[in-house]
Amino acid sequence: MSDSPAYSGQMKDELIFKIQRVLSQRITQEMQVVYLLVELRKLMDREAYQDSVLRMFCNWVVHTKLERRAEGSEIILTEFDEIMTGLLERNAGTTHFEHLSLDKFREALARCFDAFNLSAPFIREDGEYVKFVRLYSSVVGECPIVFSASKIPLKHVEQIELQGFCEGILVNELPVPQWRITLKDGKTMNWGFHMG
């Protein structure tokens, strides 16, 4: 292997070609979703492309625990901590997530595809995006993932775990994730939050 600029450029072009080949097909299988997000994550790392929301959603596909203090874990933990603060201190719970939503995932994918001049029909077509999200949900729902590290001190939340998706429950055609929230006092809560 060579570290020459020409070789490096060839590798980038090949990676972009592989991603575009997947994007050019209808995405109908879980393995396509996994492959796409793993390759996209490689491209992001190589090109130093920063998008914490996209990184978080890509991480879910391949990890069972996110214990490093990384931006993706921090986003999720902080948003859950804000919800718990509202619920426990002001009795004003909300399930609105600023970053942890499938709409934000779609926006992050679109920005990344635009940045690398990739064409992704499923991003523009609502029905195809719903199919993509259902496949994605099936992948991440098969194996629980634990988020337990944040660079920012949290007030109430110790860790959260995505345990899967509520069986047979859809909101706006999208599955509802089931979360187990562990608070700093040791109490746990199980909640389903719509991410649409």
Image (cartoon, rainbow, N blue to C red):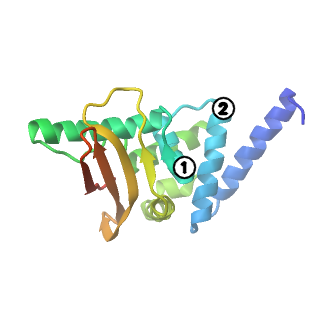
For label 1, count other residues whose C-alpha is less than 10 Å away and answer few (under 14), some (14-19) or many (20+): few
Q: Which mark is residue 47?
A: 2
Q: Which quadrant does the N terminus fall into?
A: top right
Task: Give the residue type that dot 2 points to.
Answer: Glu
| Residue under the image location 62 percent in, 53 percent down | 36
- Which secondary structure lies at badge 2? helix
- Which secondary structure lies at badge 1? loop
Would residue 173 appear left or right of 49 to someone viewing this image? left
| Residue under the image location 40 percent in, 44 percent down | 104
Would residue 172 appear left or right of 41 to someone viewing this image? left
**Towards the viewer: 71 or 121:** 71
Would residue 186 appear left or right of 36 to someone viewing this image? left
**Towards the viewer: 59 or 16:** 59
Q: Residue furthest bottom?
A: 168
For label 2, count other residues whose C-alpha is less than 10 Å away and answer few (under 14), some (14-19) or many (20+): few
Percent x, y of residue 9: 80, 34
Percent x, y of residue 62: 57, 51
Percent x, y of residue 188: 26, 50
What residue sits right under mark 1 in the picture?
63
Would residue 35 appear left or right of 81 to someone viewing this image? right
User: Total label count?
Assistant: 2
Question: Mark 1 and 2 residues: CB-CB less than 8 Å, in contact?
Answer: no
- Residues at marks 1 and 2, CA–CA distance in whole angstroms: 22 Å
Q: Quadrant of residue 154?
A: top left
Q: Residue furthest front?
A: 186
Q: Quadrant of residue 185?
A: top left
| Residue under the image location 59 percent in, 32 percent down | 49
Task: Give the residue type that dot 1 points to.
Answer: His
